[in-house]
């Protein structure tokens, strides 16, 4: 039952973001000139690509890598008692 709740809120978030983005674009088309809006659209493409690249699972991999390396680093660190790392 808990997983369905997560999916529901994730769907609500995606729909809300899409609607707000669409509404923002409508407002911008009325406020900007055609050339300025075209420049904004080109910048938005690069921003979207950068966001997709940054969210392609690297954070999960880094967290997993940190979890496997952390005990080794903590056991060799002289300050392990200050950080709360277990000494081996």
Image (tube, rainbow, N blue to C red):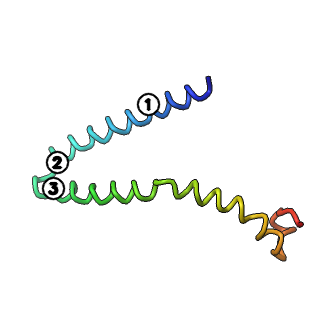
- Residue where numbered disc 3 is placed: 38
Of the 4 image quadrants, the one containing the N terminus is top right
Give the distance between the C-alpha atoms of the residues marked 2 and 1, in whole angstroms: 29 Å
Q: Are marks 3 and 1 in contact (CB under 8 Å)?
A: no
Q: Is residue 7 above or below residue 34?
A: above
Pick the residue in front: 27 or 15: 15
Instruction: Specify whether 83 is left or right of 65.
Output: right
Calculate the distance from the C-alpha at mark 3 to the C-alpha at mark 1: 30 Å
User: What secondary structure is marked by label 3?
Assistant: helix
- Cβ atoms under marks 3 and 2 closer than 8 Å: no
Q: Residues within 10 Å of mark 2 (few under 14, many from 20)?
A: few
* Residue where numbered disc 2 is placed: 31
Choose mark 2 or mark 1, whichever is in front: 1
| Front position in the image: 19 or 58 | 58
Mark 2 residue element: helix
Of the image marks 3 and 1, the number of the one nearer the N terminus: 1
Residue projecting furthest to the top: 1
* 10 Å crowding of disc 3: few (<14), some (14-19), many (20+): few
Residue identifier under label 1: 12
Residue 38 rendering spot, x and y as whole percentages:
15, 55
Circle 2/circle 1 CB separation < 8 Å: no
Query: Does 24 sit above or below residue 87?
Result: above
Position of 84 with respect to 38 (left or right) is right
Q: Looking at this view, is 27 or 5 the one in front?
A: 5
Of the two numbered discs 3 and 2 in the rendering, the one whose residue sits closer to the viewer: 3
Q: Residue at position x 25%, y 59% from top?
A: 43
């Amino acid at each position: 039952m808990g997983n369905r709740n997560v999916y529901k809120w994730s769907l609500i978030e995606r729909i809300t973001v899409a609607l707000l983005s669409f509404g923002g674009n409508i407002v911008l088309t009325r406020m900007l000139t055609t050339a300025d809006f075209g420049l904004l659209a080109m910048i938005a493409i690069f921003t979207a690509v950068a966001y997709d690249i940054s969210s392609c699972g690297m954070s999960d991999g880094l967290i997993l890598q940190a979890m496997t390396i952390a005990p080794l680093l903590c056991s060799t660190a002289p300050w392990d008692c200050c950080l709360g790392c277990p000494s081996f």
